[in-house]
Image (cartoon, rainbow, N blue to C red):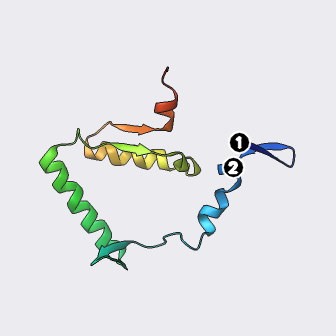
Amino acid sequence: MSNLRVDGWLACLKGLNQRKLYGSPDRLEFPEKRIGGWWERISWDQAISEIGAKVKSLRAEHGADPTKMYVGTAAGFSMLQPIFAQGFMQGLGSKSIYGSASQLGRSR
């Protein structure tokens, strides 16, 4: 069954389990980098610096158009995600943002 009743309301399984995303012992709370086959904790400054350098390098080599972003349904749990995603992609010069709605909304 895709929907369950909770206190007289209908809720999907994703909605019912949303709080588990934030309380999971497996949730990452800091950046990690794979070094020699292992994941090692790195600083936020190092992570932002390395990611920024890689994004700049890829954009210089390929331009902004090949840069795409797919936003999955879990992003629906964040009210600010659409604003940040759009701002990030606009900063790169790309308008290519896709999500589950862009696939589900198409005629079949």
Q: Are marks 1 and 2 in contact (CB under 8 Å)?
A: yes
Q: CA distance from mark 1 to mark 2?
A: 7 Å
In percent of the image, x 17 and y 43: which residue is there?
63
Crowdedness of circle 2 by 10 Å Cα count: few (<14), some, many (20+)?
few
Question: Is residue 16 shown left or right of residue 28?
Answer: right
**Could you tell me the amino acid type at mark 1?**
Ser
Q: Is residue 54 above or below residue 71?
A: below
Mark 1 or mark 2: which comes first in sequence?
1
Q: Residue furthest top?
A: 107
Amino acid residing under circle 2? Leu
Residue in the image at 13% along x and 50% along y: 60
Q: How many marks?
A: 2
Q: What residue did someone put label 2 on?
A: 13
On screen, residue 75 versus residue 97, left or right, reads right
Residue 2 point in image, percent of width and height:
71, 42
Instruction: Name which residue lies at 49% across and 46% down.
Output: 72
Residue 88 got which mark?
none
Q: Quadrant of the N terminus?
A: top right
Instruction: Name the residue rendered at 63%, 69% in the picture.
Output: 23
Q: Secondary structure at mark 2?
A: helix
Q: Position of residue 61 (x, y in %)?
A: 12, 49
Secondary structure under badge 1? loop
> Quick check: 29 above or below 19?
below
Instruction: Tell me if mark 1 has few (under 14), some (14-19) or many (20+) residues whose alpha carbon lies within 10 angstroms of its own.
Output: few
Q: Position of residue 43 (x, y in %)?
A: 35, 77
Please name the residue that numbered disc 1 is placed on: 2
Residue 22 position in % (x across, y down): 60, 65
Drawn side of residue 9 relative to residue 85, left or right: right
Q: Is residue 66 above or below residue 56?
A: above
Q: Residue furthest right?
A: 8
